[in-house]
């Protein structure tokens, strides 16, 4: 990696601070986000209760605001600002239940008459962007109750036993986590389609779920080998869901790599639901039942259409000794994403399977709106 011992220790400390802040948000606790333009108190919107809002307001001495992403704000017909985070002032009628509804699109069709919703005209400060990012890292809806902290934030932190995290650490968290991936175990695991398979686990130092590399056959680092990037899909890979083509892609990729004389690698990445997590993926499925396509569903939740990262895959390949590959994919973003992190894709190998009555609209959306080669 090239970093000094001191640099690694600095990265690890920054990573731990973000880890702890994410855990606090998931425990329904507020955290202090320190930014260059001020320190803000933040709490996850989907876990709010009325007493929590009251205490929050007491600590900051003013009515807090609701921070949403530009995608979610657009669904609520809030005029855009050109900023990726939008601040909404709280009104008297906005109790915890209402704020949860503003954050969660599950209530959109049942409660279409909410509003009027005004926005703060000024751009959201960096700490607000950091608060939304923390919610995403915690696999929560990307919406937060926020307010600037008057006076010395250290006093509030000490008095109420609150964690403080710097927005710069939040912004660099995912790159840091990818850079610090550690190979932790390797074993020979014969599969139904191929007996010559070894699985190498890579553990993120943030305590998250391990990524896996399946080395199929005998791939040689000195020549471009066939590689498939596969994001984990509990419903498709394990349960055989018909709503996506993930299970077919996974098993099909193993067969294709097995048939290649040079072998290859399948990277099984812990990025469920295009990086939004299983719970939010189920929320997106619910929206699809209401008639929204997969891109619209993610954006109604407040996420980008695809939140996946490609640096973890690139780092895994480098640790295994591969910097040039043939990529088994129909997604042009995977080619571009790997290239940004030092992996040369010498060839794209098509990877598609027939649609069924449950996923034909999903596959059509991937082709029309996400640019997949299908």
Image: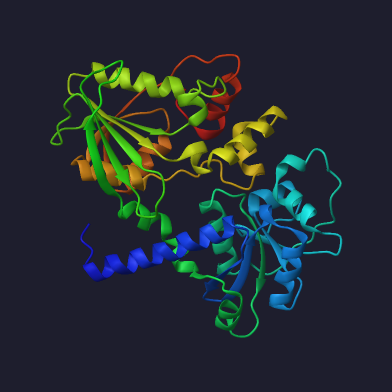
| Quadrant location of the N terminus in the rendered image | bottom left
Camera sees residue 86: yes
Seen from this angle, which residue lies furthest bottom?
151
Instruction: Please name the residue shown 43% across and 32% down the image.
Output: 331
Instruction: Please name the residue shown 60% across and 22% down the image.
Output: 361
Q: Give the tally of numbered discs.
A: 0
Instruction: Please name the residue shown 33% across and 69% down the image.
Output: 10
Camera sees residue 82: no
Give x and y (percent) for residue 263: 21, 24
Q: Relative to 222, is 312 above or below?
A: below
Give x and y (percent) for residue 6: 25, 71
Q: Relative to 68, is 35 above or below?
A: below
Q: Relative to 191, is 175 above or below?
A: below
Nearer to me, 81 or 325? 325
- State how the image is colored: rainbow
Q: State the image quarter where residue 351 is shown.
A: top left
Instruction: Please name the residue shown 64% across and 53% down the image.
Output: 70
Is 242 left, or right, of 63 in this rendering? Answer: left
Q: State the image quarter where residue 61 is shown.
A: bottom right
């Amino acid at each position: 990696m090239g970093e000094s011992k001191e640099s690694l220790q600095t990265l690890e400390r920054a990573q731990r601070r973000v880890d702890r802040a994410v855990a606090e948000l998931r425990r329904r606790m507020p955290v202090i986000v320190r930014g260059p333009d001020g320190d803000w108190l933040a709490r996850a919107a989907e876990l709010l209760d009325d007493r929590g809002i009251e205490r929050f307001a007491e600590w900051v001495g003013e009515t807090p605001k609701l921070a949403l992403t530009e995608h979610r704000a657009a669904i609520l017909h809030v005029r855009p600002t050109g900023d990726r985070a939008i601040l909404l002032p709280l009104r008297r009628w906005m109790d915890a239940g209402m704020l949860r509804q503003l954050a969660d699109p599950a209530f959109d069709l049942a409660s279409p008459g909410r509003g009027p919703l005004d926005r703060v005209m000024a751009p959201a400060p960096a700490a607000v962007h950091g608060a939304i990012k923390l919610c995403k890292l915690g696999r929560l809806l990307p919406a937060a109750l926020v307010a600037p902290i008057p006076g010395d934030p250290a006093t509030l932190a000490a008095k109420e036993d609150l964690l403080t995290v710097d927005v710069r650490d939040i912004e660099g968290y995912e790159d840091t986590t990818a850079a610090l991936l550690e190979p932790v175990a390797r074993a020979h695991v014969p599969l139904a389609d191929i007996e010559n398979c070894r699985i190498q686990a890579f553990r993120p130092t943030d305590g998250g779920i391990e990524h896996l590399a399946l080395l199929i056959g005998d791939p040689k680092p000195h020549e471009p080998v066939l590689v498939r990037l596969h994001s984990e899909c509990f419903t498709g890979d394990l349960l055989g869901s018909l709503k996506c083509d993930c299970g077919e892609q996974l098993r099909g990729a193993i067969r294709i790599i097995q048939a290649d004389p040079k072998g290859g690698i399948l990277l099984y990445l812990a990025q469920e639901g295009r990086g939004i997590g299983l719970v939010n993926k189920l929320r997106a499925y619910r929206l699809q039942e209401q008639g929204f396509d997969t891109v619209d569903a993610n954006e109604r939740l407040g996420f980008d259409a695809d939140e996946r990262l490609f640096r973890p895959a690139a780092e895994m390949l480098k640790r295994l000794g591969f910097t040039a590959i043939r990529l088994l994919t129909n997604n042009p973003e995977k080619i571009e994403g790997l290239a940004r992190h030092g992996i040369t894709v010498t060839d794209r190998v098509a990877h598609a399977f027939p649609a069924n009555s449950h996923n034909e609209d999903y596959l059509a959306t991937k082709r029309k709106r996400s640019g997949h080669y299908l």
